[in-house]
Amino acid sequence: MSSWSYALTNKGRQLQAKAQAGAQLSYTRMVVGSGSLSGQSLEAMTALITPVKDLAIERIRRPPGTTRALIGATLRNQGVTTGFFLREVGIFATDPDDGEILYMYANAGTTADYIAPQGDGVIEKAINMNVFVGAAANITANIDESLVYATRQELAEAIAGINIGDASLTEKGVTQLSSSTNSNAEDKAATPKAVKTVNEAALAAQNTANAANLAAAAAQTTANASLTAGNERKAEVVAALVALGVSASTSDSWATLISKMTAIIKATGNATAADLLTGKTASNANGPITGTMPNRGAGGTVTPGTTNQTLAAGYYSSPITVLGDTDLVASNIRNGVDIFGVVGSLQPSLMAQLQIRSNSVQARFQYADNSNETNMYSLTATGLAFKPRVIIVYNPSAFSADRAFTFYAADFDDGIYPNTIKFGNFTGGVSTSRTVINFKADVLPAQVTNTGFTLPVALAGALYEVLVMG
Protein backbone atom coordinates (compact mmCIF):
# COMPACT_ATOMS: atom_id res chain seq x y z
CA MET A 1 0.00 0.00 0.00
CA SER A 2 1.36 3.41 -0.99
CA SER A 3 2.52 5.98 1.57
CA TRP A 4 2.22 9.50 0.17
CA SER A 5 4.12 12.70 0.87
CA TYR A 6 2.19 15.69 -0.41
CA ALA A 7 2.14 19.47 -0.18
CA LEU A 8 0.61 22.58 -1.70
CA THR A 9 2.95 23.90 -4.38
CA ASN A 10 4.20 27.47 -4.31
CA LYS A 11 1.78 28.26 -7.15
CA GLY A 12 -0.97 26.50 -5.17
CA ARG A 13 -0.25 28.62 -2.09
CA GLN A 14 -0.48 31.79 -4.20
CA LEU A 15 -3.84 30.66 -5.65
CA GLN A 16 -5.07 29.65 -2.18
CA ALA A 17 -4.28 33.14 -0.93
CA LYS A 18 -6.29 34.62 -3.81
CA ALA A 19 -9.18 32.27 -2.91
CA GLN A 20 -9.05 33.49 0.69
CA ALA A 21 -9.56 37.00 -0.72
CA GLY A 22 -12.67 35.91 -2.66
CA ALA A 23 -11.32 34.49 -5.96
CA GLN A 24 -12.91 31.30 -7.26
CA LEU A 25 -10.94 28.12 -6.48
CA SER A 26 -11.64 25.88 -9.51
CA TYR A 27 -9.97 22.47 -9.85
CA THR A 28 -9.53 21.29 -13.46
CA ARG A 29 -8.05 17.79 -13.48
CA MET A 30 -5.94 15.16 -11.71
CA VAL A 31 -2.79 13.71 -13.34
CA VAL A 32 -0.95 10.54 -12.33
CA GLY A 33 2.64 9.67 -13.17
CA SER A 34 5.61 7.40 -12.44
CA GLY A 35 8.39 9.93 -11.77
CA SER A 36 10.81 9.61 -8.84
CA LEU A 37 12.02 12.58 -6.82
CA SER A 38 15.73 13.32 -7.01
CA GLY A 39 16.07 16.08 -4.45
CA GLN A 40 13.27 18.35 -5.69
CA SER A 41 11.15 20.24 -3.19
CA LEU A 42 7.46 19.26 -3.29
CA GLU A 43 6.49 22.92 -2.96
CA ALA A 44 8.62 23.95 -5.97
CA MET A 45 7.00 21.43 -8.37
CA THR A 46 5.16 22.97 -11.35
CA ALA A 47 4.45 19.73 -13.25
CA LEU A 48 4.70 15.98 -12.82
CA ILE A 49 8.13 14.47 -13.44
CA THR A 50 6.82 11.67 -15.68
CA PRO A 51 3.09 12.16 -16.35
CA VAL A 52 1.28 9.04 -17.59
CA LYS A 53 -2.46 9.73 -17.65
CA ASP A 54 -4.96 12.57 -17.13
CA LEU A 55 -7.94 11.76 -14.88
CA ALA A 56 -11.22 13.63 -14.86
CA ILE A 57 -12.28 14.86 -11.41
CA GLU A 58 -15.43 12.91 -10.43
CA ARG A 59 -16.18 14.20 -6.92
CA ILE A 60 -15.41 17.08 -4.60
CA ARG A 61 -16.65 17.18 -1.00
CA ARG A 62 -15.98 19.68 1.77
CA PRO A 63 -17.57 18.97 5.13
CA PRO A 64 -19.11 22.12 6.64
CA GLY A 65 -16.76 24.18 8.81
CA THR A 66 -13.55 22.40 7.62
CA THR A 67 -10.47 23.80 5.87
CA ARG A 68 -9.95 20.76 3.66
CA ALA A 69 -11.81 19.28 0.71
CA LEU A 70 -11.74 15.73 -0.65
CA ILE A 71 -11.07 15.65 -4.40
CA GLY A 72 -11.52 12.28 -6.06
CA ALA A 73 -10.99 10.59 -9.43
CA THR A 74 -10.86 7.01 -10.73
CA LEU A 75 -7.75 5.54 -12.39
CA ARG A 76 -8.64 2.95 -15.02
CA ASN A 77 -6.04 1.02 -17.02
CA GLN A 78 -8.12 1.30 -20.18
CA GLY A 79 -5.81 2.68 -22.88
CA VAL A 80 -2.67 1.98 -20.80
CA THR A 81 -0.34 0.00 -23.10
CA THR A 82 2.65 -0.14 -20.74
CA GLY A 83 2.42 -0.88 -17.00
CA PHE A 84 3.79 1.75 -14.60
CA PHE A 85 4.26 2.50 -10.88
CA LEU A 86 1.69 4.97 -9.55
CA ARG A 87 4.32 7.11 -7.85
CA GLU A 88 3.09 10.70 -8.28
CA VAL A 89 -0.27 12.52 -8.29
CA GLY A 90 -0.92 16.14 -9.15
CA ILE A 91 -4.09 18.24 -8.83
CA PHE A 92 -4.36 21.16 -11.22
CA ALA A 93 -6.47 24.31 -10.77
CA THR A 94 -7.14 27.53 -12.68
CA ASP A 95 -5.35 30.66 -11.45
CA PRO A 96 -7.19 33.85 -12.54
CA ASP A 97 -3.83 35.42 -13.43
CA ASP A 98 -1.57 32.50 -14.48
CA GLY A 99 -4.06 30.07 -16.04
CA GLU A 100 -3.84 26.38 -15.17
CA ILE A 101 -1.25 25.62 -12.41
CA LEU A 102 -0.16 22.57 -10.37
CA TYR A 103 -2.03 23.20 -7.09
CA MET A 104 -0.97 20.16 -5.08
CA TYR A 105 1.71 17.50 -5.64
CA ALA A 106 2.12 14.08 -3.96
CA ASN A 107 4.80 11.37 -4.35
CA ALA A 108 4.77 7.81 -2.97
CA GLY A 109 8.48 7.10 -3.56
CA THR A 110 9.39 3.43 -3.17
CA THR A 111 5.92 2.50 -1.82
CA ALA A 112 4.25 3.09 -5.19
CA ASP A 113 1.62 0.59 -6.43
CA TYR A 114 2.09 -1.08 -9.83
CA ILE A 115 -0.62 -0.44 -12.44
CA ALA A 116 -0.80 -3.27 -15.01
CA PRO A 117 -1.48 -2.43 -18.69
CA GLN A 118 -4.78 -3.02 -20.45
CA GLY A 119 -5.05 -6.73 -21.28
CA ASP A 120 -3.66 -7.89 -17.92
CA GLY A 121 -7.00 -7.46 -16.18
CA VAL A 122 -9.30 -4.50 -15.60
CA ILE A 123 -8.14 -1.99 -12.97
CA GLU A 124 -10.34 0.71 -11.46
CA LYS A 125 -8.62 2.47 -8.57
CA ALA A 126 -10.29 5.31 -6.65
CA ILE A 127 -7.87 8.13 -5.84
CA ASN A 128 -9.02 10.59 -3.16
CA MET A 129 -6.76 13.49 -2.15
CA ASN A 130 -7.36 15.60 1.01
CA VAL A 131 -6.59 19.10 -0.22
CA PHE A 132 -6.18 22.23 1.93
CA VAL A 133 -8.64 24.96 0.86
CA GLY A 134 -8.60 27.17 3.94
CA ALA A 135 -11.54 29.56 4.29
CA ALA A 136 -12.16 29.83 0.53
CA ALA A 137 -15.89 30.25 -0.01
CA ASN A 138 -16.15 29.50 -3.77
CA ILE A 139 -14.78 26.02 -4.60
CA THR A 140 -15.65 24.20 -7.84
CA ALA A 141 -14.27 21.46 -10.11
CA ASN A 142 -14.66 20.50 -13.77
CA ILE A 143 -16.62 17.25 -13.36
CA ASP A 144 -17.71 15.06 -16.31
CA GLU A 145 -21.02 13.65 -15.01
CA SER A 146 -20.81 10.71 -17.46
CA LEU A 147 -17.77 9.40 -15.55
CA VAL A 148 -19.17 9.76 -12.00
CA TYR A 149 -19.95 6.60 -10.01
CA ALA A 150 -21.07 6.59 -6.36
CA THR A 151 -18.77 4.85 -3.90
CA ARG A 152 -20.20 2.20 -1.55
CA GLN A 153 -19.97 4.61 1.39
CA GLU A 154 -21.69 7.40 -0.56
CA LEU A 155 -24.45 5.01 -1.63
CA ALA A 156 -24.95 3.76 1.95
CA GLU A 157 -25.16 7.32 3.27
CA ALA A 158 -27.67 8.27 0.58
CA ILE A 159 -29.87 5.20 1.31
CA ALA A 160 -29.75 5.84 5.05
CA GLY A 161 -31.20 9.29 4.53
CA ILE A 162 -34.24 8.06 2.61
CA ASN A 163 -37.55 8.08 4.55
CA ILE A 164 -40.57 6.80 2.64
CA GLY A 165 -44.07 7.00 4.16
CA ASP A 166 -47.14 4.88 3.50
CA ALA A 167 -48.80 5.24 0.12
CA SER A 168 -52.35 6.57 -0.34
CA LEU A 169 -54.59 7.61 -3.21
CA THR A 170 -52.97 11.06 -3.12
CA GLU A 171 -49.38 10.29 -1.95
CA LYS A 172 -46.59 8.03 -3.21
CA GLY A 173 -45.04 5.71 -0.64
CA VAL A 174 -44.76 2.18 0.78
CA THR A 175 -47.72 -0.10 0.14
CA GLN A 176 -48.63 -3.67 1.12
CA LEU A 177 -48.89 -6.38 -1.58
CA SER A 178 -52.03 -8.49 -1.89
CA SER A 179 -52.91 -11.54 -4.02
CA SER A 180 -56.68 -11.07 -3.59
CA THR A 181 -58.69 -10.79 -6.80
CA ASN A 182 -62.03 -9.68 -5.28
CA SER A 183 -60.98 -7.05 -2.67
CA ASN A 184 -62.26 -3.44 -2.63
CA ALA A 185 -59.21 -2.12 -0.67
CA GLU A 186 -57.49 1.04 -2.00
CA ASP A 187 -54.32 0.96 0.14
CA LYS A 188 -52.82 -2.30 -1.22
CA ALA A 189 -51.04 -3.26 -4.43
CA ALA A 190 -51.78 -6.35 -6.51
CA THR A 191 -49.10 -9.04 -6.70
CA PRO A 192 -48.09 -10.62 -10.03
CA LYS A 193 -50.03 -13.69 -8.92
CA ALA A 194 -53.27 -11.66 -8.57
CA VAL A 195 -52.65 -9.99 -11.95
CA LYS A 196 -51.97 -13.40 -13.52
CA THR A 197 -55.20 -14.86 -12.12
CA VAL A 198 -57.32 -11.98 -13.44
CA ASN A 199 -55.49 -11.98 -16.78
CA GLU A 200 -56.00 -15.72 -17.28
CA ALA A 201 -59.75 -15.38 -16.55
CA ALA A 202 -60.02 -12.49 -19.02
CA LEU A 203 -58.08 -14.38 -21.70
CA ALA A 204 -60.30 -17.46 -21.27
CA ALA A 205 -63.44 -15.37 -21.70
CA GLN A 206 -61.92 -13.59 -24.72
CA ASN A 207 -60.90 -16.91 -26.31
CA THR A 208 -64.44 -18.27 -25.91
CA ALA A 209 -65.90 -15.17 -27.54
CA ASN A 210 -63.31 -15.25 -30.34
CA ALA A 211 -64.05 -18.89 -31.09
CA ALA A 212 -67.75 -18.17 -31.35
CA ASN A 213 -67.13 -15.21 -33.68
CA LEU A 214 -64.80 -17.26 -35.88
CA ALA A 215 -67.29 -20.08 -36.19
CA ALA A 216 -70.01 -17.65 -37.21
CA ALA A 217 -67.74 -15.93 -39.72
CA ALA A 218 -66.65 -19.23 -41.22
CA ALA A 219 -70.23 -20.33 -41.68
CA GLN A 220 -71.09 -17.03 -43.36
CA THR A 221 -68.03 -17.24 -45.64
CA THR A 222 -68.89 -20.77 -46.69
CA ALA A 223 -72.40 -19.75 -47.51
CA ASN A 224 -71.26 -16.72 -49.53
CA ALA A 225 -68.64 -18.75 -51.39
CA SER A 226 -71.20 -21.36 -52.31
CA LEU A 227 -73.43 -18.70 -53.84
CA THR A 228 -70.84 -16.73 -55.80
CA ALA A 229 -67.87 -19.03 -56.46
CA GLY A 230 -69.28 -20.52 -59.66
CA ASN A 231 -70.05 -17.23 -61.38
CA GLU A 232 -66.82 -15.53 -60.21
CA ARG A 233 -64.55 -18.34 -61.37
CA LYS A 234 -66.34 -18.54 -64.73
CA ALA A 235 -65.89 -14.78 -65.24
CA GLU A 236 -62.18 -15.10 -64.46
CA VAL A 237 -61.75 -17.97 -66.94
CA VAL A 238 -63.60 -16.04 -69.66
CA ALA A 239 -61.44 -12.95 -69.07
CA ALA A 240 -58.26 -15.02 -69.32
CA LEU A 241 -59.37 -16.65 -72.60
CA VAL A 242 -60.32 -13.29 -74.13
CA ALA A 243 -56.91 -11.84 -73.10
CA LEU A 244 -55.28 -14.68 -75.08
CA GLY A 245 -57.38 -13.93 -78.18
CA VAL A 246 -59.87 -16.76 -77.72
CA SER A 247 -63.56 -15.95 -78.11
CA ALA A 248 -65.44 -16.77 -74.88
CA SER A 249 -68.53 -15.66 -72.88
CA THR A 250 -69.97 -16.27 -69.40
CA SER A 251 -72.96 -17.79 -71.19
CA ASP A 252 -70.71 -20.66 -72.35
CA SER A 253 -71.02 -23.85 -70.36
CA TRP A 254 -68.12 -25.11 -68.27
CA ALA A 255 -67.65 -27.98 -70.75
CA THR A 256 -67.30 -25.49 -73.64
CA LEU A 257 -64.84 -23.31 -71.71
CA ILE A 258 -62.72 -26.35 -70.79
CA SER A 259 -62.56 -27.40 -74.43
CA LYS A 260 -61.36 -23.89 -75.42
CA MET A 261 -58.71 -23.90 -72.70
CA THR A 262 -57.42 -27.32 -73.84
CA ALA A 263 -56.94 -26.01 -77.40
CA ILE A 264 -54.64 -23.13 -76.28
CA ILE A 265 -50.98 -23.55 -77.29
CA LYS A 266 -48.82 -22.26 -74.43
CA ALA A 267 -45.94 -20.00 -75.46
CA THR A 268 -42.47 -20.91 -74.16
CA GLY A 269 -38.93 -19.62 -74.44
CA ASN A 270 -36.84 -16.90 -72.75
CA ALA A 271 -36.18 -14.49 -75.63
CA THR A 272 -36.46 -10.76 -74.91
CA ALA A 273 -36.94 -7.73 -77.14
CA ALA A 274 -33.16 -7.21 -77.28
CA ASP A 275 -32.74 -10.74 -78.71
CA LEU A 276 -34.91 -10.03 -81.81
CA LEU A 277 -34.14 -7.86 -84.84
CA THR A 278 -35.94 -4.53 -84.96
CA GLY A 279 -39.42 -5.01 -86.43
CA LYS A 280 -39.55 -8.78 -85.77
CA THR A 281 -42.18 -10.17 -83.37
CA ALA A 282 -42.52 -13.30 -81.24
CA SER A 283 -44.06 -14.44 -77.98
CA ASN A 284 -43.01 -16.25 -74.84
CA ALA A 285 -44.55 -17.15 -71.48
CA ASN A 286 -44.82 -13.44 -70.68
CA GLY A 287 -46.72 -12.59 -73.85
CA PRO A 288 -45.91 -11.04 -77.26
CA ILE A 289 -42.60 -9.18 -77.77
CA THR A 290 -41.28 -6.88 -80.54
CA GLY A 291 -37.57 -6.92 -81.38
CA THR A 292 -35.25 -3.96 -80.68
CA MET A 293 -31.86 -5.36 -81.88
CA PRO A 294 -30.42 -3.00 -84.59
CA ASN A 295 -29.52 -4.51 -87.98
CA ARG A 296 -25.97 -3.24 -88.72
CA GLY A 297 -25.62 -4.88 -92.16
CA ALA A 298 -22.37 -6.43 -93.38
CA GLY A 299 -19.55 -6.96 -90.88
CA GLY A 300 -16.55 -5.76 -92.93
CA THR A 301 -12.91 -5.26 -91.94
CA VAL A 302 -11.34 -3.48 -88.96
CA THR A 303 -7.80 -2.10 -89.40
CA PRO A 304 -5.99 -1.44 -86.09
CA GLY A 305 -4.87 2.14 -85.54
CA THR A 306 -3.62 4.42 -82.78
CA THR A 307 -7.04 4.76 -81.09
CA ASN A 308 -9.76 2.31 -80.03
CA GLN A 309 -12.40 1.47 -82.64
CA THR A 310 -15.80 0.37 -81.38
CA LEU A 311 -18.39 -1.44 -83.51
CA ALA A 312 -21.88 -0.66 -82.24
CA ALA A 313 -23.84 -3.57 -80.74
CA GLY A 314 -26.36 -5.22 -83.02
CA TYR A 315 -26.77 -7.81 -85.78
CA TYR A 316 -24.14 -8.14 -88.57
CA SER A 317 -25.02 -10.14 -91.69
CA SER A 318 -21.40 -11.19 -92.41
CA PRO A 319 -18.23 -11.83 -90.38
CA ILE A 320 -16.15 -8.96 -88.91
CA THR A 321 -12.45 -9.32 -89.75
CA VAL A 322 -9.79 -7.66 -87.54
CA LEU A 323 -6.59 -7.42 -89.61
CA GLY A 324 -3.30 -8.84 -88.30
CA ASP A 325 0.33 -8.31 -89.38
CA THR A 326 3.18 -10.86 -89.29
CA ASP A 327 5.59 -8.02 -88.45
CA LEU A 328 3.94 -7.56 -85.03
CA VAL A 329 6.73 -9.34 -83.13
CA ALA A 330 8.87 -8.26 -80.17
CA SER A 331 12.07 -7.97 -82.24
CA ASN A 332 10.47 -5.25 -84.43
CA ILE A 333 9.30 -3.12 -81.46
CA ARG A 334 11.48 -0.85 -79.36
CA ASN A 335 12.41 -2.35 -76.01
CA GLY A 336 9.71 -1.80 -73.37
CA VAL A 337 6.99 -0.58 -75.81
CA ASP A 338 3.73 -2.56 -75.61
CA ILE A 339 1.67 -2.85 -78.84
CA PHE A 340 -1.48 -4.95 -78.52
CA GLY A 341 0.13 -6.97 -75.72
CA VAL A 342 3.41 -7.57 -77.59
CA VAL A 343 6.26 -6.03 -75.55
CA GLY A 344 9.21 -4.96 -77.68
CA SER A 345 12.78 -6.19 -77.21
CA LEU A 346 14.56 -4.13 -79.89
CA GLN A 347 17.47 -2.18 -78.37
CA PRO A 348 18.11 1.10 -80.25
CA SER A 349 21.66 2.05 -81.17
CA LEU A 350 22.99 5.05 -79.19
CA MET A 351 25.60 6.99 -81.18
CA ALA A 352 26.45 10.58 -81.93
CA GLN A 353 28.97 12.11 -84.39
CA LEU A 354 29.98 15.63 -83.33
CA GLN A 355 32.28 18.48 -84.31
CA ILE A 356 33.57 20.36 -81.24
CA ARG A 357 36.11 23.19 -81.01
CA SER A 358 38.67 22.84 -78.21
CA ASN A 359 39.27 25.37 -75.43
CA SER A 360 42.05 27.94 -75.94
CA VAL A 361 43.06 27.91 -72.24
CA GLN A 362 45.10 25.05 -70.80
CA ALA A 363 44.20 23.13 -67.63
CA ARG A 364 46.08 20.61 -65.46
CA PHE A 365 45.15 16.96 -66.11
CA GLN A 366 46.15 14.20 -63.61
CA TYR A 367 48.24 11.21 -64.77
CA ALA A 368 46.58 7.84 -64.08
CA ASP A 369 49.61 6.60 -62.08
CA ASN A 370 49.63 9.78 -59.90
CA SER A 371 53.25 10.41 -61.01
CA ASN A 372 52.56 13.86 -62.44
CA GLU A 373 50.05 16.20 -64.03
CA THR A 374 50.45 18.27 -67.19
CA ASN A 375 48.88 21.24 -69.00
CA MET A 376 46.50 20.24 -71.82
CA TYR A 377 43.77 21.94 -73.77
CA SER A 378 40.26 20.59 -73.17
CA LEU A 379 37.22 19.67 -75.27
CA THR A 380 33.70 19.66 -73.71
CA ALA A 381 30.35 18.24 -74.86
CA THR A 382 26.97 18.61 -73.11
CA GLY A 383 23.29 17.79 -73.74
CA LEU A 384 23.70 14.20 -74.98
CA ALA A 385 20.62 11.99 -74.79
CA PHE A 386 22.62 9.10 -73.35
CA LYS A 387 25.62 8.42 -71.15
CA PRO A 388 28.82 8.00 -73.23
CA ARG A 389 30.60 4.67 -72.98
CA VAL A 390 33.09 5.02 -75.87
CA ILE A 391 34.58 8.37 -77.07
CA ILE A 392 37.08 8.84 -79.95
CA VAL A 393 38.47 12.34 -80.61
CA TYR A 394 40.80 13.35 -83.51
CA ASN A 395 41.68 16.44 -85.60
CA PRO A 396 41.45 15.68 -89.34
CA SER A 397 43.14 18.94 -90.43
CA ALA A 398 46.30 18.15 -88.48
CA PHE A 399 46.15 14.40 -88.90
CA SER A 400 48.89 14.14 -91.56
CA ALA A 401 51.46 16.06 -89.51
CA ASP A 402 50.44 15.41 -85.92
CA ARG A 403 48.43 12.27 -85.44
CA ALA A 404 47.07 13.14 -82.00
CA PHE A 405 43.97 11.42 -80.67
CA THR A 406 42.06 10.99 -77.43
CA PHE A 407 40.28 7.73 -76.55
CA TYR A 408 37.92 6.81 -73.65
CA ALA A 409 36.08 3.58 -72.90
CA ALA A 410 33.84 3.18 -69.84
CA ASP A 411 35.43 1.18 -67.02
CA PHE A 412 38.59 0.68 -69.12
CA ASP A 413 41.27 -0.68 -66.77
CA ASP A 414 44.80 -1.11 -68.12
CA GLY A 415 46.17 -2.17 -64.75
CA ILE A 416 47.18 1.39 -63.83
CA TYR A 417 43.83 3.01 -63.00
CA PRO A 418 40.28 1.61 -63.42
CA ASN A 419 38.85 4.70 -65.21
CA THR A 420 41.39 5.90 -67.79
CA ILE A 421 41.58 8.34 -70.73
CA LYS A 422 44.15 7.42 -73.40
CA PHE A 423 45.89 10.37 -75.11
CA GLY A 424 48.16 9.39 -78.02
CA ASN A 425 50.48 11.48 -80.24
CA PHE A 426 52.16 9.96 -83.31
CA THR A 427 54.60 12.08 -85.42
CA GLY A 428 56.58 11.27 -88.55
CA GLY A 429 55.57 9.69 -91.80
CA VAL A 430 55.52 6.13 -90.57
CA SER A 431 54.89 6.62 -86.83
CA THR A 432 58.56 7.00 -86.04
CA SER A 433 57.74 8.75 -82.76
CA ARG A 434 54.93 7.63 -80.49
CA THR A 435 53.70 9.03 -77.16
CA VAL A 436 50.78 7.62 -75.09
CA ILE A 437 49.67 9.26 -71.83
CA ASN A 438 47.08 7.80 -69.44
CA PHE A 439 44.93 10.38 -67.65
CA LYS A 440 42.36 9.86 -64.87
CA ALA A 441 38.83 10.21 -66.30
CA ASP A 442 37.18 11.02 -62.96
CA VAL A 443 39.49 13.79 -61.66
CA LEU A 444 38.55 17.32 -62.74
CA PRO A 445 38.79 18.91 -65.17
CA ALA A 446 38.43 15.49 -66.85
CA GLN A 447 34.94 13.98 -66.42
CA VAL A 448 32.30 11.80 -68.10
CA THR A 449 28.69 12.49 -67.00
CA ASN A 450 25.28 11.08 -67.95
CA THR A 451 24.88 13.70 -70.70
CA GLY A 452 28.40 14.87 -71.65
CA PHE A 453 32.16 14.86 -71.06
CA THR A 454 35.41 16.92 -70.83
CA LEU A 455 38.58 15.32 -72.27
CA PRO A 456 42.21 16.51 -72.88
CA VAL A 457 43.37 17.38 -76.46
CA ALA A 458 46.63 18.67 -77.97
CA LEU A 459 45.55 21.77 -79.93
CA ALA A 460 43.99 25.07 -78.83
CA GLY A 461 40.86 26.32 -80.59
CA ALA A 462 40.97 23.44 -83.10
CA LEU A 463 37.86 21.82 -84.61
CA TYR A 464 37.83 18.15 -83.62
CA GLU A 465 35.78 15.26 -84.97
CA VAL A 466 34.16 13.28 -82.12
CA LEU A 467 32.49 9.86 -82.28
CA VAL A 468 30.41 9.02 -79.17
CA MET A 469 28.74 5.68 -78.50
CA GLY A 470 26.41 4.80 -75.61
Image: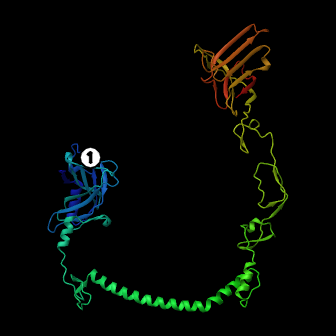
Seen from the viewer's position, the closer of residues 16 and 226 is 226
Residue 101 position within the rendered picture, expressed as x and y whole percent measured from the top left: 28, 56
Left or right: 416 in relation to 251: left
**Residue found at the far front of this picture:** 255
Q: SS of the residue at dot 1?
A: loop
Name which quarter of the figure residue 56 lies in. bottom left
Dot 1 corresponds to which residue?
Answer: 35
Residue located 69% across and 84% down the image: 237
Residue 301: x and y in percent read: 84, 52
Q: Amino acid at mark 1?
A: Gly
Residue at the image point whose x is 21% and y is 59% from the top: 128
Q: Is residue 136 visible?
A: no
Colouring scheme, one of rainbow, by chain, secondary structure, one colour: rainbow
Q: Residue at x 48, y 91 (%)?
A: 216
The image shows residue 57 at horizontal and vertical percentages of 28, 61
Splitting the image into 4 quarters, where does residue 59 fall?
bottom left
Q: Quadrant of the C terminus?
A: top right
Taking the image as drawn, is residue 425 in sight?
yes
Residue 186: give x, y in percent of width and height: 23, 89
Q: How many marks?
A: 1
